[in-house]
């Protein structure tokens, strides 16, 4: 999130579920799309992302960033 825009990964990114943490990670280049913070579509996507992974392949890519993605998770 930025001050005037909200960004989402274009494809779902793996993460450890609640109660688990990453045991092993791998760097991956992730594509992100951004929308103005006060855009209705941005608000809808924020709510939807809390419920399920988003598939945003039809959205334009705003930037690409290298992100650590878990490849193995362990309970803590």
Image (cartoon, rainbow, N blue to C red):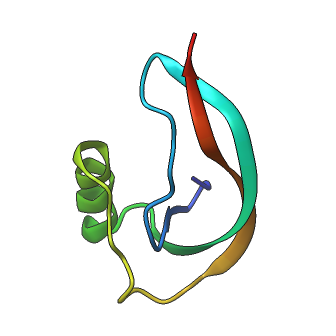
Residue 35 percent across, percent down from the top left: 45, 72
Asked if residue 76 lies left or right of residue 68, the reply is left
Q: Which residue is rendered at x = 50% and y = 34% of the image?
A: 16
Q: Quadrant of residue 61?
A: bottom right
- The residue closer to the viewer here, 54 or 42, is 54
Q: What is the residue that sits farthest to the top in this orientation?
A: 76
- The residue closer to the viewer here, 29 or 25, is 25
Question: Does residue 56 lie above or below 53 as drawn?
Answer: below
Asked if residue 23 lies left or right of residue 16, the reply is right
Residue 37 percent across, percent down from the top left: 44, 61
Residue 65 percent across, percent down from the top left: 73, 68
- The residue closer to the viewer here, 54 or 19, is 19
- The quadrant of the rendering that contains the C terminus is top right
Q: Which residue is rendered at x = 51% and y = 42% of the image?
A: 15
Asked if residue 26 lies left or right of residue 58, the reply is right
Residue 72 percent across, percent down from the top left: 60, 38
Q: Which residue is rendered at x = 57% and y = 31% of the image?
A: 73
Question: Does residue 51 lie above or below 48 as drawn?
Answer: above
């Amino acid at each position: 999130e930025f001050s005037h825009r909200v960004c989402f990964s274009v494809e779902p990114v793996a993460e450890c579920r609640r109660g688990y943490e990453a045991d092993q990670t791998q760097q991956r280049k992730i594509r992100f799309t951004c929308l103005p913070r006060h855009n209705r579509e941005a608000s809808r996507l924020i709510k939807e992302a809390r419920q399920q992974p988003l598939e945003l392949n039809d959205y334009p890519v705003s930037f690409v960033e290298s992100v650590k993605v878990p490849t193995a998770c362990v309970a803590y």
